[in-house]
Image (cartoon, rainbow, N blue to C red):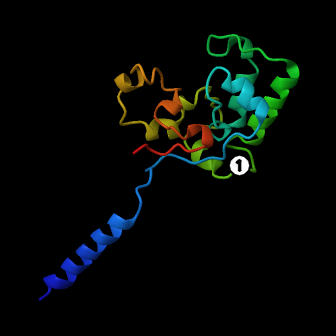
Amino acid sequence: MRLLPTSLFAAGFLCLAATVPARAEGGATVPPIDNPVVQKECGACHMAYAPQMLPTRSWQAIMGNLGDHFGENASLPASDGATILAYLVAHAGDAPSTANGRRFMRGIPADATPLRITDTRFWKRGHNEISAASFGAPNVKSKANCVACHSGAAAGQYGEEE
């Protein structure tokens, strides 16, 4: 009977699938931010975002205008600003030593300087099935609140929650 091998294969596959632990789908994994100045100063108002998700020129523009940081005055002492900028640039998506940075840079034209991670093709493709209403929910509040949906974001884990 020809059906038997197919049935055995399907049954074996289902048994194997049942023994594999569930994993988060999609998303990205990046090294967690290990600089205490970046964690302290950036994390004082929002989570410290993964520098891999923007190019060097974006971090330079953001850090160059902290007096008007998305409508807030986020000015820092010069030494802290220099430390943060150096860290962001060293780990930016287009930095030579950044592993998998090209993944985040795809779709960002060389002459574009996105100031928000949520404006990048990578972010938009990963969130295209989420409604605007979901981002406005009381427990989320905005697209910039990564940890509302990605509980491991601070540790560099941006997979889909299950």
Is residue 108 shown to the viewer in this render?
A: no
Q: Which residue is mark 1?
A: 98
Q: Quadrant of the C terminus?
A: top left
Q: Position of residue 87 (x, y in %)?
A: 78, 36
Q: Is residue 18 above or below residue 38?
A: below
Horizontal side, residue 94 vs residue 117: left or right: right
Dividing the picture into quadrants, the one containing residue 68 is: top right
Rendered residue at 70%/23% (across/down): 62
Horizontal side, residue 110 vs residue 141: left or right: right
Q: Position of residue 101 (x, y in %)?
A: 64, 47
Dot 1 alpha-carbon crowd within 10 angstroms: few under 14, some 14 to 19, many 20 or more = some
Pick the front one: 78 or 155? 155
Name the residue type under label 1.
Thr
Is residue 113 shown to the viewer in this render?
A: yes
Q: Position of residue 136 (x, y in %)?
A: 40, 20
Q: Is residue 80 above or below residue 158?
A: above
Dividing the picture into quadrants, the one containing residue 70 is: top right
Dividing the picture into quadrants, the one containing residue 95 is: top right
Q: Quadrant of the N terminus?
A: bottom left
Furthest residue toward left? 1
Q: Position of residue 139 (x, y in %)?
A: 43, 23
Q: Is residue 2 above or below residue 47?
A: below
| Count of all numbered marks drawn on residues in the image | 1
Horizontal side, residue 86 vs residue 162: left or right: right
Rendered residue at 70%/10% (across/down): 73
What secondary structure is marked by label 1? loop
